[in-house]
Amino acid sequence: MSHSDVIADRAEKVIARCKRLASVTEARGSTCRTFLSIATRECYRVVGEWLEAAGAEVTIDAAGNLRGFYPAAQTAAPRLLLGSHLDSVPDAGAYDGVLGVVLAVSLLETLEDRRLPFAIEVIGFSEEEGIRFGTPFIGSRALVGKINDELLNRTDTNGVSVRTAIENFGLKPTEISKAAMNSDSLAYVEFHIEQGPVLESLGIPLGIVEGIAGQTRAEFTFLGRANHAGTTPMNLRHDAMSGAAEWILEVERVAKREKGLVATVGRIVATPNAANVIAGQVRLSLDVRHKSDNARIRAADFLAVQAEEIAHRRGLTVERKVLLNQPAVSMDPFLMDQIEQAARQTGCTTHRMVSGAGHDAMILAEKIPTAMIFLRTPGGLSHHPSESVSVEDVAKAIECGTLLLTQLAASVEFQKRTARA
Ligand SMILES: [Zn+2]
């Protein structure tokens, strides 16, 4: 078999494994795996077998992350972390998160028991999507030591706390501090589907993530006066719905004006929400993202001023509640260059891009140099059963990952690095 046939075989195996894991689910007829569910246990059993067969020692930490340790040529060597998350949204596809873990397993397999100057730890994060407890990144937060009592006491819709969920899985919440990443961790690299249309529109299989956009989330409430839709003349109304509508279009206009800015009103709740009553109150969500914190904060502040202006002109009032103000995160320049070099060697044109979605990489970047590689997502479709990737693109990812390991193994600069923690 030629080299490219071998890689194509590995890529097909990766896709088959992702599809197999999509059938490991807690929902009937669709894919759903939430934090430490019964389906998670089966998923860990299957992935754990693959990891062991590839030469890794498998454990589950107290935050429920699946961890596979592939030793280095020498003991007391540092380690490289590879991974992504194994939980999913309801009615999920087969690749979001899972692909990053299965690709990491495949990279261990390509080593064929060859040892590198650093160990490789593959991590399948237990919780990234935030479905069960409404709080994302529980798995990766444990690696950076950011699990506190408040988080452990949060409950799901059945009243089961994070702490109890961990105990029910047979793990010890008191040992969560031991889930923190080892101080010998050099870097974290995550493969993930793009979940957007950019790479497809450019005709490029792999994207190099340069940063993860910061996010502002807020709730705006326009307050007017509910009244009869038939008897209240137009000039005597305080219509919260019309004010909200004008502001929604302003949100779109402001976002279109600034390159890289995305702003969304995705939720609207009108009160009393009746066909023959002028809306007295309209509550709206606002989500603003940009790679530059300044640009994001400026836009969010401007939109708050515009809401005031619109409300004032229409005889309404407006209230704002900021729910999230999360700074942007940069990926590691050295690793980005290394990935670019590896990707080019596979014959790919490379593209650097910002991730509009949050990822475990965002959490780990607080402590260690971190990089992400995106795979082209057909139709830009994700969080959907039709989510897909092509065999050719997965083959490019395997080739790029293998070359990256070779480069890092030869790089004195890389191995001298120690955790910023
Ligand atoms: Zn994901």
Image: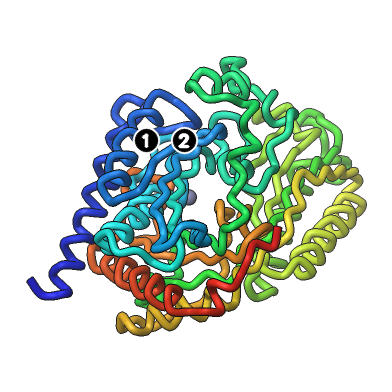
Q: Amino acid at mark 1?
A: Tyr
Instruction: Tell me the quadrant of the picture where the C terminus can be found.
Output: bottom right
User: Does residue 209 appear to the left or right of 222 in the view shown?
Assistant: left
The image shows residue 256 at horizontal and vertical percentages of 65, 70
Asked if disc 2 and disc 1 are in contact, CB closer than 8 Å, the reply is yes
x 37%, y 84%: residue = 344
Q: Residue furthest top?
A: 159
Secondary element under disc 2, as helix, strand or loop, is strand
Q: Earlier in the sequence, mark 2 or mark 1?
A: 1
Look at mark 1 in the image and give the residue it sits on: 44
Q: Nearer the viewer, residue 162 or 184?
A: 184
User: Does residue 212 appear to the left or right of 49 in the view shown?
Assistant: right
x 59%, y 19%: residue = 164
Q: Is residue 88 visible?
A: no
x 81%, y 29%: residue = 227
Name the quadrant containing residue 378: bottom left
Q: Amino acid at mark 2?
A: Ile
Q: Nearer the viewer, residue 64 or 52?
A: 52
Instruction: Tell me the quadrant of the picture where the N terminus can be found.
Output: bottom left
User: Does residue 125 appear to the left or right of 277 in the view shown?
Assistant: left
The CA distance from mark 2 to mark 1 is 9 Å
Mark 2 Cα shell of 10 Å, populated few (<14), some (14-19), many (≥20): some
The image shows residue 241 at horizontal and vertical percentages of 74, 42
Q: Nearer the viewer, residue 93 or 283?
A: 93
Look at mark 2 in the image and give the residue it sits on: 60
The image shows residue 213 at horizontal and vertical percentages of 64, 63
